[in-house]
Amino acid sequence: MAHDQPNKNLHMQDSSTEFSAPVRALSHKGHGVVTHPDGRVLFVKGIWTGEVGRFRVSDRAKSYDNAELISLQERSSDRVTPPCAHVETCGGCPWMMVNEDAQARAKEQRITFLLDKNGIAVSERRPLLRSPDFFGYRNRAQFKTDGERIGYVSEGTNDLAPIDDCLILNPSMREILKGLRAQLPQSVWRPVGRFPWSFLDVDDQQTLKDVVPNQRRPFRQGNSAQNEQMKAWITKTLQDVAKDAPVIEAFCGSGNFTEALVQVGFKHILAAEVRGSAIEELRAKQMAGVQIMEINMSEKKVWQQLARQNPKARVLIVDPPREGLEERAGLFESLPLLEKIIYISCEPTTWARDLKDFQKSGWKVAHLTPLDMFPHTPHVELLTLLTR
Ligand SMILES: C[S@@+](CC[C@H](N)C(=O)[O-])C[C@H]1O[C@@H](n2cnc3c(N)ncnc32)[C@H](O)[C@@H]1O
């Protein structure tokens, strides 16, 4: 009998109903959070806290957790007209529709929320270090191309969103993008793998002829001015530490922070990294007093292995990827002389998880400076000092 079966049509009909609601908050991806009349919590792109909108849950929204904005019924005074023509299709700058102060406030609010939720006490918290350039700051990008068009892939899809320019790129990168566009159509960029595009990892230290499709480049901090601020923060934070104190720097990449540590006089640094290409670049720098260790920081007993090389480490610096410190077991037991930990994070959720653990082990967050690495996105970098 028909009514013995789950009625899929009824679900589709129900879920495509339009509704109006206020935006209660922003999600960790920076989307508006609204409540459907049936009680479901849904996420909506292109809307800001405090605004009221008319929404629709539809297949086009890709997931039943998402709704689409049909019209704005109450508009935030923080709204601005995004200067980028591709803002909706590209999706890389989901916050470009609000002003700089509103973006900064939202980043600060997310940190406060996570600190409160996890019961983390911070002795000294500085305001968000803003990017000197609100536009034109990005020194690297990963473009996608099918050989006919070039652009980015919209979040949560495999759809290529072509662009003719990108306003968050710095002037050199915009020139490179122009040069790449001039090469279209380009048969060597046609997709070969499982995705309908090839990727072009590009940064402003390259020339056009060095761009090779589908070849990842070692990690590089994406905003050069903010990278300088990060390095200055690290050296200032460690200014009172004796320069003969042994240091472990985990997730060191190609030695961006290592160079700053060497420059201020640290003489015993164990620099740990997993990616071969980053290690090659690090080795090529031939820094005195730096011992390089190729190691996967997610492995069991990783801290014991680091401690064997540098058992008297007094300073630990970690700058992990979004996953945070996945392997934390044995850290404090293996390194009993640690006095200071600098934790740089690009993902507040895993950062809060890890700080909560550190706090349980008797460490306190002595200082926090959040930094805006990528304006127009919800991304926030966290510069943290922990002490015993
Ligand atoms: C956020 S980047 C930081 C790099 C460096 N501090 C810098 O400023 O350029 C994170 C680094 O961790 C490395 N990494 C990622 N997963 C790792 C793992 N499981 N073990 C060791 N290193 C890892 C990446 O290759 C990358 O170089």
Image: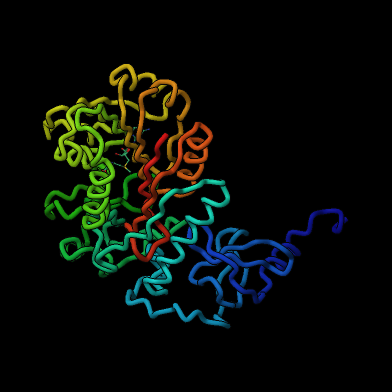
Write the residue at 36% across / 53% down: 369
In this view, the residue in front, 154 or 312, is: 312
In this view, the residue in front, 188 or 280, is: 280
Q: How is the image coloured?
A: rainbow
Left or right, residue 89 beside residue 25: left
State whether residue 159 is above or below residue 48.
above
Quadrant position of the C terminus in the picture: top left
State whether residue 143 is above or below residue 341.
below
When asked about the image quadrant of residue 181, the answer is: bottom left
In this view, the residue in front, 128 or 160, is: 128
When asked about the image quadrant of residue 343, the answer is: top left
Quadrant position of the N terminus in the picture: bottom right
Write the residue at 62% across / 67% down: 34
Is any atom of residue 285 visible in this view? Answer: yes
State whether residue 322 is above or below residue 130.
above
Residue 377 x, y percent position in the rendering: 39, 62
Is any atom of residue 166 visible in this view? Answer: no
